[in-house]
């Protein structure tokens, strides 16, 4: 159970959790200006109109406390829709009249009429919302700013009254209205009331009235269209030369039937403002005059307004326009014309069960006009999709609505008899959604089986499916990305391993060359020294030079081979010829170059044991050379 608060200050407990709901316990509230009639809209085949079967009156009440302060919501720095929230209907009327008088070019549009109040507009802490639309240009943006500065302070509050004063005004109006109900009954209209000629007024019985003005004869006559009748008939036999006399006759009618200005449901429909792509009536241009607008209030999508002020629109169906284009039946066979007339009759008598029956009729007409057999047998080029659309327009069905109805017809054709019975009970918006070619098969089966019974359930399930699909795509993309990274890392590792093997082979070759060089040096050291009885210094110098040349030639060849394999660019400028001193100095350079070659290779060795053996072997060779060199001093 949830506690709700009425505008007059009562607290009502209801078994619902909606943000705003209706209070129908209003037996003691007769006369309250915030009461709204409730009851279903019924289609009358004879009058081709909808009228509400009033079952009682209710007031709208929110869960939160009532906010009596009028406020402006929205921004004046953009061209989006804004709104005025208030319970002071006089203030809303003043704002509405100011907009109409100041901006006849419709730079901004906003209208309030106490006779066409819609319950779903009580969306802001119990306040009524008047939506103001802005032209999508600089003039519209400037007009919206002018409206704001005309009536509101910088914080969006009302200029001319405080919240406390507004609250007292609203509560006082309720008290006076309820207290004066008995006195006002039967005198809703004075003899001075005036009615606009040729405009329609509707009474509590559903009968419609008007004062017909014959301009050529300069006469006025009251007429009535009885509920269930197609024709206007005189309300009495009198003709009047003065409008005031006809208005007095209307006063007598009003005392009995409480006449109100008649308006088509299309006049207050918010479908043109809706941005829900899943709704067939979104962005409606009213070309169908409400023919396709058959979704119940619970199924109507939320409007394109501020996030904190969204409301579900009431969009009852409206009658078909009387000024529809005529359809050209020429070029069609009698059988085809008869079939089309049959389909037209079905449409005219199927308003109550619009989606199912009209979908069948549209499907029948489409099958007839798109039949290749008819096209061949009649030798006429009229059997085309264009002809089908022209026929649909002639009965008040736009192209988009026609193809949506065809989708519904196909859905029914592909269903079993039991499934068709379930679909016939489904709301229009759910049928439109399930009939889309893009509808998931599992959701369509859920609608056919009766597991999904409202459009809200369908859209929630569709959102879950889309969310899961997006998650799966994201996971798949992540997996592919990681797999690509892993493949790249594996290729890089393979290249590194190949380079490592190449470096190891190069290191082995260098080590082998060093071992060969060390063995040759040892062989020279162990060779016996021949002592001449007479020293021939020239011969000694020649032999030393030959040995140095031979030693450096072999070492230089080994280093050149190592240089080619490792890519070392250092140039070795070994002296091919020279004396023993030059040869000794050259050997020192060779040792330093060997170290420079050995060091980067050592860094590439990843195995610690191999690295240890290589270092120990190198140091052993260095120590061995050091010891031998020290002995020569």
Image (cartoon, helix red, strand yellow):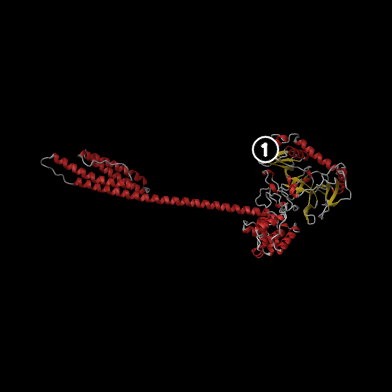
- Residue 186, can we see it? no
Q: How many marks do you count on the picture?
A: 1
Residue 234 placement (x, y as % from top left) = 86, 51
Neighbor class of circle 1 (other Cα within 10 Å; few <14, some 14-19, many 20+) is some
Q: Is residue 519 left or right of residue 207?
A: left
Residue 264 placement (x, y as % from top left) = 76, 49
Mark 1 = which residue? 139
- Residue 507, can we see it? yes
Name the quadrant of the C terminus: top left
Examine the rendered structure and indicate whether residue 93 appears above or below residue 400.
above
**Toward which corner of the image does residue 553 lie, by quadrant?**
top left
Residue 315 placement (x, y as % from top left) = 73, 50
Q: Nearer the viewer, residue 622 or 387?
A: 387
**Toward which corner of the image does residue 539 lie, by quadrant?**
top left
Residue 494 placement (x, y as % from top left) = 40, 52
- Residue at (25, 45) in percent of width and height: 555
Q: Nearer the viewer, residue 174 or 261?
A: 261
Residue most toward the left? 533
- Under circle 1, the secondary element is helix
Q: Is residue 596 left or right of residue 346?
A: left
Q: Is residue 189 left or right of residue 150?
A: right
Q: Nearer the viewer, residue 44 or 186?
A: 44
């Amino acid at each position: 159970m949830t506690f709700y608060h009425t505008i007059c200050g009562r607290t009502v407990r209801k078994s619902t959790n909606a943000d705003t709901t209706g209070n129908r316990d209003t037996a003691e509230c007769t006369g309250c200006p915030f009461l709204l009639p409730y009851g279903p809209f019924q289609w009358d085949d004879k009058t081709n109109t909808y009228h509400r079967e009033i079952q009682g009156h209710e007031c709208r009440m929110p869960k939160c406390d009532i906010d009596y302060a009028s406020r402006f919501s929205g921004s004046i720095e953009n061209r989006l829709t804004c709104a005025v929230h208030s319970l002071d209907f006089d203030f809303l009327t003043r704002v509405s009249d100011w907009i109409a008088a100041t901006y006849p070019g419709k730079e901004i549009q906003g209208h309030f009429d106490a006779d066409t109040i819609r319950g779903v507009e009580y969306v802001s802490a119990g306040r009524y919302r008047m939506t103001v639309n802005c032209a999508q240009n600089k003039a519209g943006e400037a007009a919206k700013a002018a409206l704001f500065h005309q009536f509101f302070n910088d914080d969006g509050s009302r200029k001319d009254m405080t919240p406390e004063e507004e609250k007292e005004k609203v509560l006082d109006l309720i008290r006076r209205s309820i207290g004066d109900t008995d006195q006002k009954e039967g005198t809703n209209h004075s003899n001075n009331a005036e009615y606009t000629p040729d405009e329609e007024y509707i009474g509590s019985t559903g009968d419609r009235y008007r004062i017909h003005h014959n301009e050529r004869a300069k006469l006025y006559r009251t007429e009535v269209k009885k509920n269930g009748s197609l024709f206007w008939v005189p309300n009495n036999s009198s003709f009047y030369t003065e409008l005031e006399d006809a208005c007095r006759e209307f006063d007598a009618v009003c005392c009995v039937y409480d006449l109100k200005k008649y308006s088509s449901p299309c006049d207050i429909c918010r479908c043109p403002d809706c941005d829900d792509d899943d709704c067939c009536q979104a962005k409606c241009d009213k070309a169908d005059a409400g023919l396709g607008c058959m979704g119940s209030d619970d199924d109507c999508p939320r409007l394109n307004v501020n996030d904190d002020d969204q409301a579900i629109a009431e969009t009852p169906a409206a009658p078909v326009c009387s000024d529809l284009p005529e359809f050209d039946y020429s070029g069609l066979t009698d059988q085809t014309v008869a079939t089309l007339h049959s389909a037209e009759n079905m449409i005219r008598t199927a308003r109550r069960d619009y989606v199912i029956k009209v979908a069948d009729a549209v499907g029948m007409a489409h099958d007839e006009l798109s039949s290749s057999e008819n096209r061949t047998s009649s030798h006429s080029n009229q059997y085309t999709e264009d002809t089908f659309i022209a026929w649909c327009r002639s009965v008040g069905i736009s192209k988009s609505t026609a193809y949506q109805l065809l989708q519904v017809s196909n859905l029914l054709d592909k269903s079993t008899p039991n499934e068709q019975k379930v679909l016939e009970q489904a709301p229009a918006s759910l049928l439109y959604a399930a009939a889309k070619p893009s509808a998931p098969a599992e959701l369509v089966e859920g609608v056919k089986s009766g597991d999904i019974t409202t459009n809200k359930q369908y859209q929630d399930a569709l959102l879950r499916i889309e969310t899961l699909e997006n998650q799966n795509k994201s996971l798949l993309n992540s997996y592919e990305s990681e797999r690509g990274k892993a493949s790249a890392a594996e290729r890089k590792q393979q290249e590194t391993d190949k380079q490592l093997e190449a470096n190891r082979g190069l290191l082995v070759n260098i080590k082998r060359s060093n071992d060969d060089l060390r063995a040759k040096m040892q062989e020279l050291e162990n060779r016996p020294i021949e002592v001449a009885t007479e020293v021939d210094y020239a011969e000694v110098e020649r032999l030393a030079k030959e040995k140095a040349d031979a030693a450096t030639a072999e070492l230089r060849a080994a280093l050149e081979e190592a240089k080619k394999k490792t890519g070392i660019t250092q140039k070795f400028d070994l002296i091919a010829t020279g004396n023993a001193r030059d040869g000794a100095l050259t050997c020192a350079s060779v040792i330093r170059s060997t170290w420079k070659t050995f060091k980067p290779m050592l860094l590439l060795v990843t195995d610690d044991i191999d690295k240890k053996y290589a270092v120990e072997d190198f140091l052993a060779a260095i120590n061995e050379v050091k010891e031998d060199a020290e002995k020569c001093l």
